[in-house]
Image: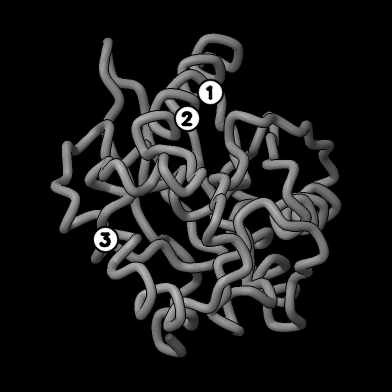
Amino acid sequence: MIIFLRHAQAKNNVDRILAGRREGIPLTKKGIEQANKIATFLEPLKISAIYSSPIERALHTAKIIADKLDASYQIDERITEIEMGTFSGMNYEDMFEKYGNVFLRFYQNDPVIEKNGVETFSNVKKRVLEMVNHCSAVHEDKNVLLVTHMDPIKAIISTITQLRPESLYELIIRNASLTIVKKEQADFSLVSMNSMSSERYIQE
């Protein structure tokens, strides 16, 4: 299985800021707790390899999990955060007021996305699928963990399920939650989405 993990809660999530690939955005105290708890949740799955986005919030999450599982991790650019271009560092409300629903336009591959220097969703889907195919070939019949961000996870979900842009916009991938895909014969199927400890569902 290929297990996607969205990084644990980071400062940008609390402040409602589009961080993109900016540096200096750490996990919150709650995020560190989430990472430790999801590591415990992962223990029975016997992870054979861990790959992480190079972005700080993902790397810190990966390190916490790798330490707890007594494992190592590798960085892979194919599961990095999207480049947010003009919108990087903007508050959600300010962005909506100035540019409208940029998130929906992103999933629609609207021309305004590239015009503002934002990576297109079609490109995110391409690089994430490359990563999934790589892991499937290199780690055949093993469980692999990919520590990444919301939109790379939505990219693989969209590739498998063909969700409409409106559905992708409404879909929330929770911090420190698991989305699991599995190759069955020639195709990938969606096994699980937003999996986490039961107490997280109650709290959120």
Residue 122 placement (x, y as % from top left): 34, 31
> Residue 33 lies in what quarter of the image?
bottom right
Nearest the eye: 113 or 48? 113
Q: Position of residue 81 (x, y in %)?
A: 59, 47
Q: CA distance from mark 1 to mark 2?
A: 5 Å
Residue at image position (74%, 79%) is 28
User: The C terminus appears in which quarter of the rendering?
Assistant: bottom left
> Residue 73 location in percent, x, y?
79, 36
- Residue 169: numbered disc: 3
Dot in front, 1 or 3: 3
Amino acid at pointer 2: Val
Circle 2 residue: 128
Q: Earlier in the sequence, mark 3 or mark 2?
A: 2
Q: Which residue is mark 1?
A: 131
Circle 1 crowding by C-alpha within 10 Å: few under 14, some 14–19, many from 20: some
Q: Position of residue 166 (x, y in %)?
A: 16, 58
SS at mark 3 in the image? helix
Residue type for callout 1: Met
Residue contact at pointers 1 and 2, CB within 8 angstroms: yes
Judged from this view, the residue extending furthest toward the bottom is: 203
State the CA–CA distance, disc 3 to disc 2: 18 Å
Identify the element where label 2 is drawn: helix
The residue lying at 69 percent from left, 77 percent from top is 11
In the image, residue 26 sits, relative to residue 189, either above or below, namely below
* CA neighbours of label 3 inside 10 A, class few (<14), some (14 to 19), many (20+): some
Circle nearer the N terminus (1, 3): 1
**Residue type at numbered disc 3:** Tyr
**Looking at the rendering, which quadrant does residue 173 occupy?**
bottom left
